Image (spheres, rainbow, N blue to C red):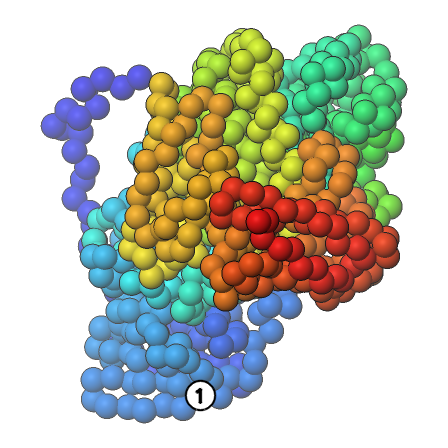
Amino acid sequence: MQTSESIKPDRVKQPVLAERALAPLGGWHAHDWGVTLTLGQRKLALQAISNDILRLVLCDDSGHIPASTVAVLPDAVQSRAGRCAVEETDEEVTLRLESWTVRIDRQLGKFDVTDSRGSVTAAGMQLFSPATGGVGAVLQAAPATRFYGLGEEAGGLDKRHEAYTMWNSDVYAPHVPEIETLYVSIPFVIRFDAGVASGLFLDNPGKTKFDFRSRFPAYEVSAATGGFDCYLFAGPTLKDVISAYTRLTGRIELPPRWAMGYHQSRYSYETQDEVLALAHTFQDKEIPLDAIYLDIHYMDGYRVFTFDRNRFPNPQQMCDELRDMGINVVTIVDPGVKRDPEYHVYRDGIANDVFCKSVEGDIFIGDVWPGPSAFPDFTDDRVGRWWADQHDFYLQRGIRGIWNDMNEPAVFNETKTMDIEVMHRNNGYPRTHRELHNLYGMLMSKATYEGLAEKLGGERPFLLTRAGYSGVQRYAAVWTGDNRSFWEHMAMAIPMVLNMGMSGIAFGGPDVGGFAHHTTGELLARWTQMGAFFPFFRNHSALETLRQEPWSFGEDIEHIVRKYIRLRYRLLPYQYTLFREASETGVPIMRPLVLEYPDDPATYNLDDQFLVGCDILVAPVCRPDLRCRAVYLPAGTWVNYWTGEHLEGGRHVLVDAPLATLPLFVRAGSIIPVDLGESNRPGQLALEIYEGKAGEVGEGRLYEDDGLTFAYREGRYRDRQLTAEFHPDHVLVRANATHDGYGQADEECLIRMHWRDGTVSEAIGRGSSFEISLNRLA
Ligand code: GLC
């Protein structure tokens, strides 16, 4: 707790020391790959990676371009031969580098970057050396410019007037709007000016800052250590920018279907009997469940890659029994390996020289759950493989899902992390922890994911992580760490996960119900309603908090929670298709309205409601005792999911929201693939069609595969374009298989046409492609 003493007059900050601009422009030099500029004493290289990606990177002291971090996919930065044309005046130099134009003020060293369409990607950008060291850039913006992205941060959707520090941190509390660092660092921002978007990624895994406050409306990005390696992304749309950023840093892999279902966790389910009883309760109560998590109590003295034999006498038998019920086990795995000469993993780690060390060669030991522990140096691929091999322990017992926690890395000391002077191996290019801090968690996930992918014999791994850096989406889903059972935290999860999605992390979600503090029945009901529409859907709570399994607050709440978990499964074919789309394009599953309605200013900072794909609109109730809420419906016609009422958009509507009802809307004209079985085992497929205007053609997509293996990569999937042609008295529904490598040839699909008047007509579509006409009921 802080008192007023923290703002005592003598505590005011020292005046900021003068910074030095990198100026003037000394000259330039064209190469076959791009151009180098001399700015002050430094050289800045410009590489046109593609029409929509331009790299600006400060050369090192010997004039070389530093290597990219692991965030960047090696294939993505094969720069093309950089044809460059130059025009000069006394004041300015204009470089045309492929499709990019860079206009530089000779004296100030400031430059504007425009893309092939003439849109400004960076305005008045000026590099500078802060007096405190490192390097930064100031960029101009307009007062109305919006900023999105930046991964997992507290606060609202639009980051204007805020400032963030990228330094992965174990923040148990407080998750408040003014907290500037959390567990994940994504130094990528999207700027958005009146419908036109562009992006900037600063590839530096040390401490970086994004400040949209101090120089408003200009903004600043800076790095405390290391170089300035920055990518600019052209729009014009938000989706274009996200797509370009994820082309550079990668997209989510399609997870197994079970990873998209409902997951139950607790710190901790402490015994084998408790876990089995939990699973049976779900079964008895007919609440579908895909995974149970084992938190740190499953281990022997918190030693990773062990089971406590008293609590879990036969993990294999437990996993087999659960698997028969369709439930997977996910075990927590932290990076800290207990310093214990009688512990085989520690001994093996010493023998193989895998742990992080100081430059003098002393192993870094930090306190975490097991007490003094050593930390594998994941910056060395050899260590990553060693770590991956330890997972045989879980795989042999039937465990397929892994949960990486405390991987900022968290250490129970004053700095909350590893000594910044630890010298990482970095595959032969040693760097201090200070320079690589933000990579630690991602590299742990990379090692784990790649190991599991290799060992699972064709099955898709599921990995969850707390910490990460740009590119982490390639390996793991991300949950938002230790929130609390506060209504405010439920509300904050919306902009947080929306911005994660716009930063490449399409598979994310908070602890549903809240982790710390005590939930209430009402909060659990409301949060489950919302969580059912987030990409990652896990209920998790902390030691000594009130229990928050679906039945913990009596039958009425249980009924509501069951209803929404089942709804999640009902809509899984729709969600599954969106996961596939995210893996192909990077466009997130859960979307802010601005992504689909960029010309509507009412959406620019709208973060108490969201879209799933572009057809479902969710407006959660994030206050207690509220039984109605205002919902903004964007342009078009929207159908109230519960009442069938058609409402014209472009306005706010007041919607009834009794506790059992989540305000939920479907776009008129949409085709939503659903699973009528509403359970964790695939059931009868149906298409729910919501009447659009006569003359309109509704469009949808349905992607299917085995939900478990990588066979889809060999073409074993079915992808269908769906259309619904609306006529005054009938609708013509077509399914057209654009790829037909999965499923039965004569498979049946129920078609349910929801007419505007509330009536529903049904028909059966057979096979992969079909065409069916359904008449309006008399
Ligand atoms: C951390 C995690 C939390 C977990 C706990 C015990 O606080 O964020 O999810 O339950 O550690 O492992």
Q: In the figure, is residue 713 to the left or right of 170?
A: right
Q: Residue at x 40, y 72 (%)?
A: 44
Whole-percent x, y for residue 162 in the image: 29, 44
Q: Nearer the viewer, residue 167 or 293?
A: 293
Residue occupying the point 43% across, 61% down: 238
Instruction: Give, as a three-letter code, the residue at label 1.
Output: Cys
In the image, residue 326 sits, relative to residue 312, either above or below, namely below
Count of number-bearing discs: 1
Q: Is mark 1 within 8 Å of ligand 1?
A: no
| The one of 339 and 513 positioned closer to us in this rendering | 513
Res 384 seen here: no
Residue at label 1?
A: 84
Front position in the image: 641 or 54? 641
Question: Residue visible at 35% across and 66% down?
Answer: 196
Element marked by disc 1 = strand
Question: How many residues crowd around disc 1 within 10 Å: few (fewer than 14), some, or many (20 or more)?
Answer: some
Give the image location of residue 16, x and y in percent. 20, 47
Task: Give the residue displayed 84% in from the left and 12% down from the top.
Answer: 313
Question: In this view of the protein, can residue 775 be seen by the observer?
Answer: yes
Q: Which quarter of the rendering shows the N terminus?
A: top left
Q: Is residue 739 left or right of residue 141?
A: right
Image quadrant assignment for residue 769: bottom right
**How far across and how far down the image is residue 722, in percent?**
65, 60
Question: Residue 673 appears at what percent x and percent y?
Answer: 65, 48
